[in-house]
Amino acid sequence: MPWKPKKPCARPGCGRLTDGRFCDAHAAEDRQRHDRARQEAQPWRGWYKVKSWLDIRAWRLSVEPLCRMCGKHGLTVAATVVDHVEPHHGDRALFFSRDNTQSLCKPCHDGPKQAAERAAARAGQPAPGRSPRRVGGV
Ligand SMILES: [Zn+2]
Ligand SMILES: [Zn+2]
């Protein structure tokens, strides 16, 4: 087994020897601090759990139960995701605006272009922007 020199924990006043930068306890603490910092940088992540958002989400899915993008391709696909039409970028007003939401299926939400192409292929139509290889046939 290769011998690795242990170093004291980088946390001032700790001094426990460790393979990493911090000892186990302080490494966990350091990770938590990073998570908190990330949350503070993107407070809107928590907005998805807020009741007013859940209300908007439920309302949107009830008035628009089908995926809007699939609908444009003439497909009937149940929506499972409520998306912001205009990206909110942490803007509270845009985030909590009913009118700024649309119903999408997960594939459309995760990758609109590919999903539309896949959906079109499933429906036996040429994918948008691509000429069909086989016309007619069996
Ligand atoms: Zn430590
Ligand atoms: Zn869709």
Image: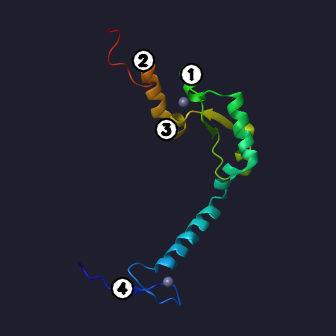
- Foreground of the two, 24 or 32: 24
What residue did someone put label 4 on?
6
Quarter assignment of residue 118: top left
Gap between marks 3 and 2, in whole Å? Answer: 20 Å
Q: Under 8 Å from ligand 2: the CB of mark 1?
A: no
- Left/right of residue 53 with respect to residue 8 in the rendered view: right
What residue did someone put label 3 on?
111
Tell me which image quadrant ligand 2 sits in: top right
- Foreground of the two, 69 or 131: 69
What residue did someone put label 1 on?
76
Instruction: Label 2: state its secondary structure.
Output: loop
Tell me the kind of residue under disc 3. Answer: Gly
Name which residue lies at 75% across and 41% down. 55
Tell me the kind of residue under disc 2. Answer: Gly
Instruction: Label 4: state its secondary structure.
Output: loop
Looking at marks 1 and 4 on the same chain, the residue that comes earlier in the sequence is marked by 4
Quarter holding the N terminus is bottom left
Gap between marks 2 and 1, in whole Å? Answer: 14 Å
Looking at marks 2 and 4 on the same chain, the residue that comes earlier in the sequence is marked by 4
Please name which of the two marks, 4 or 3, marks the residue nearer to the observer: 4
Gap between marks 1 and 4, in whole Å? Answer: 61 Å
* Residue 29 vertical placement versus 51 (above, below): below
Looking at marks 2 and 1 on the same chain, the residue that comes earlier in the sequence is marked by 1
Q: Position of residue 53 (x, y in %)?
A: 72, 45
Neighbour tally class for label 3: few under 14, some 14-19, many 20 plus, Cα within 10 Å: few
* Residue 131 vertical placement versus 57 (above, below): above
- Left/right of residue 135 with respect to residue 9 in the rendered view: left
What residue did someone put label 2 on?
124
Gap between marks 4 and 3, in whole Å? Answer: 46 Å
Looking at marks 3 and 2 on the same chain, the residue that comes earlier in the sequence is marked by 3
Please name which of the two marks, 1 or 4, marks the residue nearer to the observer: 4
Neighbour tally class for label 1: few under 14, some 14-19, many 20 plus, Cα within 10 Å: some
